[in-house]
Amino acid sequence: MKTIQEINQKIKNGDAVVVTADEMTSIVAQKGTQKAAEEIDVVTTGTFGAMCSSGAFLNFGHSDPPIKMSKTFLNGVEAYSGLAAVDAYLGATQPSQNPEIGLDYGGSHVIEDLIRGKEVELVADAYGTDCYPLKRVKTSINLDKINQATMINPRNCYQNYAVAINSTDETLYTYMGTLLPNMGNITYSSAGTLSPLINDPYFQTIGMGTKIFLCGAEGYIVSEGTQHSTDAERRNGIPVGAAGTLMLQGDMKKMDANYVRGATMPKYGPTLYVGAGIPIPVLNEDIAARTAISDEQIICKIIDYGVPRRSRPVVRETNYQELKTGKIEIDGVEIPTSPLSSYKLAKMVSEELKDWIEKGDFLLTNPVKPLPNKGHVVNPLEISKPSILVRDIESKPVIMAYPGDKINDVAKKLVENNINHLPVVDNQGKLKGIVTSWDIADGVAKGKSKLDELMTRKVIIAREDESVDIIARRIDKNNISGLPIVDKENLVKGMITAEDISRLIGENLKNENGGESI
């Protein structure tokens, strides 16, 4: 029905009809796709969420005498300097080298500070050459002082994404935020009906060279992003999980700090909140229908992040209309939902982009090359030496105790078997608690006589199908020395201790070195 050239002429004449994606949903519902396709010229989209795969190329300019930077730090955050003498790439998720700051400040915060016009400390070291003799520089920079500051984000604007929940007994700290134990909360990260790639799911108008809104300035789509996937399961034309992605580029010197935020996911690390919006030209009736997608039609899956594997189990399906109500029922229990992204700021992005177009300040671009819409899959990293699972560890006879056991009898079991932990089970062998030698000593000192008076009832466990590496992390995280191994029915199968893991690591290192210890 239309071309981008025709729409651009209407924009120049001030005649283009521009609406946001959520407005388009109502328009199509009232008038139908044919009428909407005739009347509407552009649909603007928007998102504002955590996009970890982001960063910036910076060129600092040459000092006098010159330096070839090999180690570069900005406000204590390391940037990669293996490019040229005075270029560096600052990754959004790189944390501060200062142990007192740690994960609370990182590359994302430096990027925001620069866009806000703040001074940033630059420290660089070098090994020195004949043409670059200087070995160290310490100064301050801002966006006006350096030559280029180009945001290049390898993977932004995921086309739909997982919804997270945690089935374990412990709190998990993830890139999906803090997940409370025992399915205590649900988090999600998408603008739903406003989301850019949701409104053009087959990339009919979006491609390499498409001009976009990026952090309050004009930006461009460089190509498909890393981990771009096209062969996902779809409902209503929309992938039900993580699928397409974009690599984006923009000039940081022109960006607006209202549309970029450095942030830290608690106990996980820094991330960059990016505001991005893409205009969708309504070239035909099919595109009009695609841009009218509603929150109810955008299906997504609730994934159990309590299973630390690449493929995690699906708890149930939902949609963005249900997510935005603030609660979802699972097995008769209402669980609160919360967004990690900001719908308010996503709406602001789509509204500002709409305003730019209506004023004639922003023209649409024909893609130089379309984005792949089929044949792209995400391959896993094949590890040459697979992880050892808990079930693969040589098992020992399971020594257990029962809640009604006397403390003296339990103490004898610990001493006779030279162990420090005993899982406490019921008559069917199901885990009810755990007791340690320290618990026994404490119980005796306090005059207690039965095990159920002092055992720990909330037990951190290991599953048979979990990697030993994960168990080592769990032991370290919770400052414990061992945990019981249970199967899917919660039956105790054994114990795994920090000593077991240390011995296993030692044996592996010995084998890797031809039988020689190191």
Image: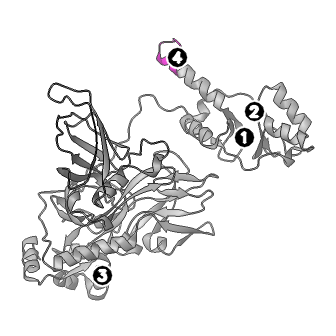
Whole-number angstrom distance, CA of label 2 to CA of label 3: 63 Å
Residues at discs 3 and 1 in contact (Cβ within 8 Å): no
Q: CA distance from mark 2 to mark 4?
A: 28 Å
Q: Residue at x 20, y 62 (%)?
A: 254
- Identify which amino acid the numbered label 2 is placed on: Val
Label 2–label 1 contact, CB within 8 A:
yes
The image quadrant of residue 125 is: top left
Residue denoted by label 3: 23
Nearest to the eye among marks 2 and 4: give it: 4
* Left or right of residue 332, residue 189 in this image: left
Q: Secondary structure at mark 4?
A: helix
Residue 492 badge: 1
The stretch of residues the image draws in magenta is 509-518
Which of the 4 quarters of the picture holds residue 109? bottom left
Is residue 261 something that shows in the picture?
yes
Q: CA distance from mark 4 to mark 1?
A: 31 Å
Q: How many marks?
A: 4
* Residue 35 on the magenta segment: no
Report, in whole angstroms, how far the alpha carbon at label 3 lies from the one at label 4.
65 Å
Q: Secondary structure at mark 3?
A: helix
Give the percent coordinates (x, y) of residue 416. Answer: 84, 25
On-image quarter of the N terminus: bottom left
Name the image colouring: one colour
CA neighbours of label 4 inside 10 A, class few (<14), some (14 to 19), many (20+): some
495 left or right of 415? Answer: left
Mark 4 = which residue? 510
Upstream in sequence: badge 2 or badge 3: 3
* Label number found at residue 398: 2
Q: Residue furthest bottom?
A: 30
Q: Provide the major secondary structure of the magenta segment.
A: loop
| Residue shown at 89% from the left, 40% from the top | 445
